Image (cartoon, rainbow, N blue to C red):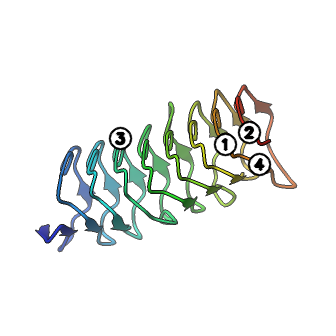
Amino acid sequence: AGTQEGVLKFTGSVTKIPAEAFKDSIQLLTISLPNTVTSIGNSAFQNDRQLQTISWSDGLTSIGFDTFRGCTVLVFDALPNSLEKIGTEAFKNCKGLLSVTFGPNLRSLGVTKEVFMGCTNLRTVDLSQTQLTTLVSGTFKDCSSLETVLLPPTLEEITGSVFGNCTSLSSVVFPSTSALRTIGASFGNCTSL
């Protein structure tokens, strides 16, 4: 791996970014992951407050917990289609995110909680192509600008305050054929619904 003028570009056959590898970096602006990278470890880029862009690996299957937490200016529109699992609080407080589209292989979004909590500029979330069966507590809580969410047909359960305090949320699109069985206290203080 090499860095030049705030750019981190991996060469060779790197397959994993280890836990805390670039945590608290103050100069990292851009990351380019080769298609050989399949996983990013826990807290690998946590609190990299200048990190703005990332070129995802087409082979990425797993993002650990707290991986990009606190990367307040990070912007991307879509996660790679290969992604299967995103850890707890992986993108918490990423205030630069405006819209996120998830790919068809996603099966796990924060085993316990708060994956995108506090992403206050996030406006649109498209989960419609995923294989998710559960959304867990606080996944999108405090995303005060969130307006639209598209849910997948595989979703069976929405637990806890998944969308709590999403005061701009005005559209939740459920598919015409849905496996949904349970909705907990998931939409508390969603005053625009």
Relative to residue 24, is residue 4 depicted above or below? below
Label 2 vs label 3, nearer the camera? 3
Q: Compute the Cα span from label 2 to label 3.
A: 26 Å
Residue in the picture at 67% in, 40% down: 167
Callout 4, which amino acid? Ser
Mark seen at residue 170: 4
Mark 1 near mark 2, Cβ–Cβ under 8 Å? yes
Mark toward the start of the polypeptide (2 vs 3): 3
Residue beneath disc 3 = 66
Q: Compute the Cα span from label 4 to label 2.
A: 21 Å
Residue in the picture at 50% in, 30% down: 112
Q: Residue 148: x and y, percent?
A: 70, 54
Q: Residue 92: x and y, percent?
A: 43, 42
Q: Residues within 10 Å of mark 1 (few under 14, many from 20)?
A: some
Callout 1, which amino acid? Thr
Callout 3, which amino acid? Asp
